[in-house]
Amino acid sequence: MGDSIVQFLETWSPIDIVLIAQNFDRFLWGALTTLELTLISLVVGGILSIPLAIIRAGNNPFLNAPVWLFTYVFRGTPLLVQTYLIYYGLGQFEWIRETFLWGPILSQAWYCALIAFSLNTAAYTTELLRGSIVNTNRGEVEAAKACGFSSPMRMRRIVLPSAFRRALPAYSNEVIFMLHGSVVASTITIQDLLGVGRWLNGRYYLAYEGFITAAVLYFIIVLAVSRGFRFWEKHWLQHLYPREALEVKPAKGAASFRI
Amino acid sequence: MKFRKLMMAMTAAVMMLGMGSVQAADLRVGVEGAYPPFSWKESDGTLKGFDIEIAEAICAEMKRKCVLIEQDWDGMIPALKARKFDTIIASMSITEERKKQVNFSDKYYNTPAKFVARKGAGLEISKEGLKGKRIGLQRGTTHQCFMEKMYPDAELVLYGTQDEVFQDLAIGRIDAQFSDSIAADDGFLKTDAGKDFEFTGADQHDEACHGPGAGMTVRKSDDELRMELNKALKAIRANGVYQKINAKYFEFDIFGG
Amino acid sequence: MDLIIEYQGQLLSGTWVTIKLALLSLVIAVLFGLLGAWAKLSKNILAQKIGAAYTAIVRGVPDLVLILLVFFGGQELANSIGTLTGLWDYAEISQFAAGVGTIGVVFGGYMTETFRGAILAIPKGQIEAGVACGMSRLVIFRRVIWPQMVVYALPGFSNNWLVQIKSTALVSVIGLQDVVYNGFVAGRSTRELFTFMFAVLMIYLVLTAISDVGLRWLDKRYSKGIVRSEDG
């Protein structure tokens, strides 16, 4: 019975399902690499973005200008080029290859991707958070002032918690874009989900089987992430819904992503 | 309804962009361009190398115009099967596995494969010696087949082009690389970047993976073209054109025994 | 620097390919965006479903995966359709066509959301007023919806365009000789990848900056006489 199914698939299916099934564990490992890279970059980039966003929302020109430059460069250029610059570019310099950073970190493709992705998402998240901080309800800040909160305390207790929540819908787009962006890892030898797809096609000289499998798995991951965020948004933004529903609903989808 | 018509016309126009009919007289040849000395790209964008000149010579012999089409290695066979070009002349080894998908002319050269590592690295070419070592190679080559079969415990690092393998070997991202020995010698060891590196171990050969040598690749349905290519190859070997190109690039007979 | 000058022809021709690719795919993206918004807002359930599936796929699958799929898989599909119908023997899907088509369609999905949001922002009463005045649906679209939609869609449109121009870099992976591909080839053969990748980075920054100026001009032109909330 099992044999006849395999035989049926081999003769009649336009895509080589048997081959995909045989290598499916590799695809799962690839998906794990993709998730791992995306998640760690988001955490590192997220942590970096908090102080940077506070600087950008403030009005110290000496601090503001370099941070602005950082976000402008990383948001104005493709992630692919940034990753190439770090992975292939830095190796050009002998003095970099002689530093202690080379062996454990910069010589590894995985860390290079992580650095590029983290800086990239940090730049986007910084601007996103800045917008959210700047748009904090004046009344909340004034109330905190009236209660005698110091400026750092206002930031920590009032502005940031509320800014985080309001940034959530836009941030869910950023997360999905980072997931999309992580395919760049496959161009610098990393066997992420797309990397495994390319490996399969290269190994067996196929045109599309590897890509289709990767596409389906990416789709499932994005779907799960979106669902998760929708649940979170419901949970954390509940207090904003009744009022905002009458005024401006935070635009879903593309209108608010990136930049 | 003018609006809808306009949109349809524009969509159609865009669809047409990439489509053009190809004259039967032209021979469309898939080449690579990142595999010196067999093929590389000059600063003005022109293609150079042994494969390129062989392609030109074959076309001249067949009295057809050569249209060279650059294609990344990964996609060579899919692109041939999808009729993006008629033949591949890009140092593609004739193997049984590839023959399931495509067909080959007779071989036009044959050179052995070898490992390259840093001088004095003391890499031992054995199952034990390569265990856990990072070996760089080009994705979708016979060398990938060989390594996966013979040294499954080595950590393979797969690249799109041979150039990238050399680049990362030079700066120490991989412990060794495995490729065609001539490509490694001319493309890397003889260059400035490769001066601290050397061949490690003997010639490596596995008949099932490496096959009898490099051939010109054609679609299975194109047996007529395969015959013509074979005839042209015989002719340029008989009239000395092949030997002239050989001498221009190598000091030895690359055709092999 | 000398190397950049030696390879400037390659870099410039690559930049030109990038610009052409970005502009042509923008045209497709706008067309697909309008179609998609129309489908999603349509009363026809089938159209709604197709529109929803379209935006879900675009959001669910990374653009590079789709580009690779269209370039390699699409060619085989085009061939088999040709063979089955007997209409054509071979229809080339070039790297450029695959890149323009895929990026255009992908960003059409994002434009769909932008345009849909913009159309929804137009007060219903105005459309009803149009109907009451006896305007045909086409006239309502041209006179009432379009001029306001452009204004509402502009911020989202700007975002999409800035992301799209960067996404064109991905076509270098299928071997289209854009600025990234040419810069990468030059960097590889000269073993100065930092130099060339940095140059490519700068070229993109210039393209982004020019877009910024252009979009700001558009915004000024179209938002005359409109008061917008501060985050618009």
Image (tube, coloured by chain):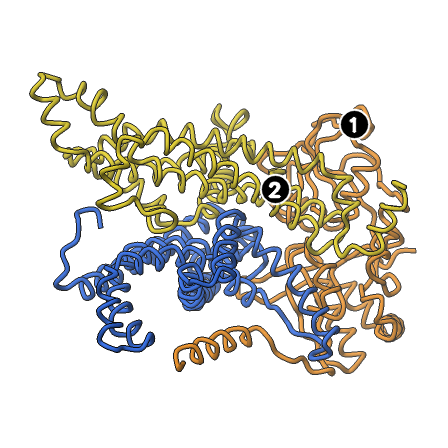
Does residue A83 sit above or below A164 in this rendering?
below
Residue A217 numbered tag: 2
On the image, the x and y values in percent for residue A13 come to 78, 54
Separation of marks 1 and 2 at Cα, in angstroms: 40 Å
Does residue B92 sit above or below B27 in this rendering?
above
Residue B21 seen in render: yes
Residue for badge 1 = B124
User: Which residue is located at x 34 percent, y 29 percent?
Assistant: A236
Does residue C173 sit above or below A147 in this rendering?
below
Chain letter matching colour blue: C
On the image, the x and y values in percent for residue A14 come to 76, 57
Indicate the chain on which mark 1 is placed.
B
On the image, the x and y values in percent for residue B95 come to 86, 53
For label 1, count other residues whose C-alpha is less than 10 Å away and answer few (under 14), some (14-19) or many (20+).
Answer: few
Q: Is residue A240 left or right of residue B122?
A: left
Amino acid tagged 2:
Leu
Q: Colour of chain A?
A: yellow
